[in-house]
Amino acid sequence: MVVRGQFITFEGGEGVGKSTQVGLLGERLRDAGHEILATREPGGSPGALDIRRLLVEGPVDRWAPLSELFLHNAARHNHVQKTVAPALAAGTWVICDRFADSTMAYQGYAQDVDLETVAQINRWAAGAVWPDLTIVLDLPVADGLARAQARPDSEDRYERMGAVFHERIRAAFLDIAKGAPTRCAVVDAAGAPDQVAEQVWDTVRTRLSI
Ligand SMILES: Nc1ncnc2c1ncn2[C@@H]1O[C@H](COP(=O)(O)OP(=O)(O)OP(=O)(O)O)[C@@H](O)[C@H]1O
Ligand SMILES: [Mg+2]
């Protein structure tokens, strides 16, 4: 019988280093002998990638918060069904750049959709797939935005949402982590990429007993 893979998610605000750390952790886990799939939300499957463009590009006010909640979860449902669940079932470890906690932070805490509604719709979309470990990367908002803005790309719709919004996002992730301490670990993202990766690795080894 194949042992189901572990599902690890990275969360945090804009530019905190999620994508960088997904890559570094993937390398370490591959070196440790695990089959690894690195993926991201919104995206990670062809259908979800189509929806991603609707969410990360264009005018800040193009969607009402509730519309965004449904779009993110339509993408999530497709991503989980087509990519994440089959990989986990095959014994592959999946590392995902953002997952349901981002929807809770952005559409719930920061855009004021009722938190219970967000939780319920997130659960519907994720089905039986829920992270075994979530690393929340924490960094002062200005530092994250400076990192993100130094990197040229057109996927900046959320980056343009203003300082108050981003402070709410940072506080939201810390609150979510506090409410789910068994699943979540907060890692200080202020150091150099290798220093942060070291803390992430310590956390993964301790929490997942590897
Ligand atoms: N620890 C770090 N110190 C300094 N710069 C970093 C660090 N980690 C990542 N960076 C750089 O900062 C930028 C943002 O990092 P990255 O893309 O990994 O963050 P992210 O959290 O995925 O951002 P986004 O939310 O926009 O997807 C990149 O240009 C990356 O090379
Ligand atoms: Mg990223």
Image (cartoon, grey):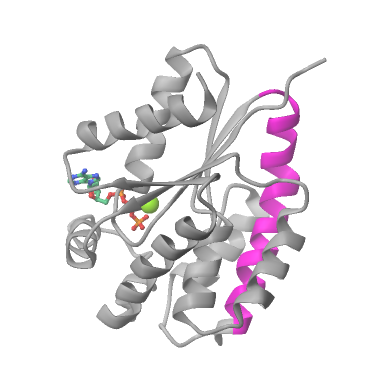
Note whether residue 25 is visible.
yes
Which residue range is magenta in the image? 66-91
Image: 29 above or below 165 = above
Question: Does residue 84 show up magenta in the picture?
Answer: yes
In the foreground, 64 or 140:
140
Q: Position of residue 106 (x, y in %)?
A: 47, 72
What residue sits 73% from the left and 24% below the top? 90
Left or right side of 139 for 161: right
Instruction: Report x, y in % for residue 150.
Output: 17, 57
The quadrant holding residue 70 is: bottom right
Q: Position of residue 5 (x, y in %)?
A: 65, 27
For this orientation, the residue located farthest to the right is 1
Toward the viewer: 69 or 172?
172
Dividing the picture into quadrants, the one containing residue 68 is: bottom right
Q: Is residue 137 left or right of residue 110?
A: left
| SS majority, magenta | helix
Residue 49 locus on image (x, y percent): 58, 56
Above or below for 51 versus 210: below
Nearer the observer, 44 or 183: 183
For residue 23, side relative to residue 107 (left or right): left
Quarter of the figure with the N terminus? top right
For residue 156, say whether it is visible. Answer: no
Note whether 104 is above or below 128 in the view shown: below
Number of labels in the image equals: 0
- Asked if the stretch drawn in magenta spans residue 61, the answer is no
Vertical arrangement, residue 162 with respect to residue 125, above or below: below
Residue at the image position 50 percent from the left and 85 percent from the top: 62
Q: Residue at x 61, y 31 (%)?
A: 6
